């Protein structure tokens, strides 16, 4: 029986190890669709390289728009912080920029405005890591952008983070700087705690003390020696705290407090999109894995336009008949985020200036399921959101917001049922 139990345990362990070796987690897929569709839409995102060595850098940059149809149940982005989404501290972020300004502090951002970001990440721990741009919003949490695999080669033990302080002090490795001091102070307080506990645990603890308290003899539990030892520990504690403060002031005369202020970053210049997009009906075909949006589109500009891409939640549905849209997808952009079927229109002819036309936009792909976006059908408001990239006859890009209610349909299942009957 024991051998059988050991064999079963080993088999279960080996099975779990085998599964773990092929699973790649995508944390952004666990976010609710309304967070991914109606908060921050990232676009023009690029990663400078798919592979870096330990201590080398990868640059992640692009733009994002805080969606006009911001969810009512989330606080508006009054306090935000530019970050990066990685599986733990596998990179060190050495630079953060927002619209060309340092983004080392929190900033308030505006809805329906665009911002350009740039982060510089230094390789720290070897492995294959999924790297996302990210905007943290107080009360809403992290809003993830699209992710790409970046490989870090080399040895983790070779990692160094040298810096030069404002007073000229050169630190060879910020990761290990000051660690001996931290260990020393922890050791001092551990010794103090051990001595204090030893003094009390040398005598019977629970049952005799409980009996003394029940008999009204609580005063007998503490004698003059206990009071003397307590006084010594109080004096020693105050002396250590005061001495540590004076030592730190002498050793580090120049310090900078943690930055709790907020910076002000102006959004990118706003260009009124001459495209009016009104959703008349949006549906998601559950068995067909297809989103269809019927909309009335008006070209308010002076030049004819075509519709090149619908972007939402990191997915890019590209109209293959628009060369500018196809050229906008970099060769190294994550393939799983660019569905091959792309976006199909009911009428792909250019929309003339001043013309209004009702169009059907079809975006069909299993990515709706793999990205877990179909759970939007369970949301209380059932709304879809995204960006529509339009191009005029001179190649100029215009970005319009797409937002509207969406309902599920099961037409394939209905057809199958009818055939069976």
Image (cartoon, grey):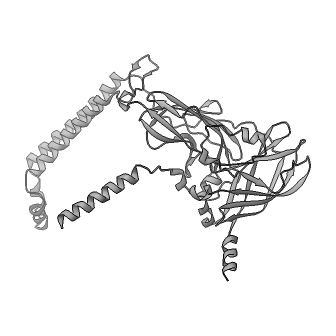
Query: Which quadrant of the structure image shows residue 175?
Result: top left
Who is closer to the viewer here, 341 or 271?
341
Residue 348: where, in percent of width, then height?
83, 51
Residue at the limit of the structure toward the front, as seen here: 420
Who is closer to the viewer here, 277 or 415?
415
Location of residue 304 with respect to 409 vertically, above or below: above
Whether residue 76 appears in this view of the structure is yes
Q: How many marks?
A: 0
Location of residue 177 with respect to 67 vertically, above or below: above
- Tell whether 286 sits left or right of 344: left
Location of residue 246 with respect to 354 vertically, above or below: above
Whether residue 74 appears in this view of the structure is no
Query: Which quadrant of the structure image shows residue 419?
Result: bottom right
Residue at the limit of the structure toward the top, as seen here: 168
- Tell whether 182 sits left or right of 256: left
Who is closer to the viewer here, 260 or 364?
364
Who is closer to the viewer here, 373 or 179?
373
Residue 124: where, in percent of width, then height?
43, 33
Query: Which quadrant of the structure image shows residue 271?
Result: top right
Residue 329: where, in percent of width, then height?
68, 40
- Identify the image quadrant of the C terminus: bottom right
Residue 146: where, in percent of width, then height?
59, 45
> Which residue shows up at 28% across the image and 29% down it?
180
- Identify the image quadrant of the N terminus: bottom left
- Tell whether 115 sits left or right of 1: right
């Amino acid at each position: 029986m024991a051998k059988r139990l050991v064999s079963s345990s080993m088999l279960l362990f080996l099975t779990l190890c085998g599964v773990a070796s092929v699973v790649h987690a995508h944390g952004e897929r666990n976010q609710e669709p309304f967070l991914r569709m109606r908060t921050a839409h990232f676009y023009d995102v690029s990663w400078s390289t798919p592979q870096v060595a330990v201590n080398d850098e990868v640059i992640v940059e692009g733009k994002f728009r805080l969606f006009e149809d911001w969810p009512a149940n989330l606080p508006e982005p009054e306090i935000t912080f530019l970050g990066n989404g990685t599986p733990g501290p596998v990179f060190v972020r050495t630079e953060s920029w927002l619209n060309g300004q340092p983004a080392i502090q929190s900033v308030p951002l505006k809805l329906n405005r665009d911002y350009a970001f740039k982060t510089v990440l230094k390789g720290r721990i070897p492995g294959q890591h999924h790297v996302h741009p990210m905007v943290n919003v107080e009360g809403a949490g992290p809003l993830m952008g699209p992710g790409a695999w970046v490989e870090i080669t080399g040895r983790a033990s070779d990692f160094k983070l040298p810096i030069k302080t404002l007073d000229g002090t050169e630190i060879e490795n910020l990761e290990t700087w000051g660690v001996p001091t931290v260990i020393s102070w922890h050791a001092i307080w551990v010794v103090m705690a051990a001595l204090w506990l030893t003094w009390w645990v040398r005598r019977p603890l629970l049952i005799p003390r409980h009996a003394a308290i029940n008999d009204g003899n609580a005063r007998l539990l503490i004698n003059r020696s206990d009071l003397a030892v307590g006084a010594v520990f109080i004096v020693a504690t105050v002396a250590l705290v005061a001495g540590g403060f004076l030592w730190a002031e002498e050793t580090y005369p120049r310090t900078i407090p943690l930055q709790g202020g907020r910076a002000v970053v102006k959004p990118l210049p706003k260009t009124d999109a001459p495209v009016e997009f009104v959703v008349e009906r949006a549906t998601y075909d559950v068995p067909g894995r297809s989103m269809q949006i019927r909309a009335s589109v008006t070209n308010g500009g002076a030049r004819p336009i075509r519709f090149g891409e619908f972007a939402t939640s990191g997915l890019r549905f590209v109209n293959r008949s628009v060369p500018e849209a196809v050229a906008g997808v970099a060769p190294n952009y994550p393939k799983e985020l660019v569905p091959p079927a792309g976006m199909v229109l009911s009428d792909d002819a250019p929309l003339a200036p001043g013309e209004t036309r009702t169009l059907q936009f079809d975006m069909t792909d299993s990515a709706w399921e793999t990205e877990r976006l179909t759970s939007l059908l369970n949301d209380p408001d059932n709304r879809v959101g995204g960006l529509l990239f339009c191009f005029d006859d001179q190649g100029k890009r215009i970005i319009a917001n797409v937002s509207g209610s969406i309902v599920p349909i099961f037409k394939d299942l209905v057809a199958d049922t009818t055939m069976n009957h």
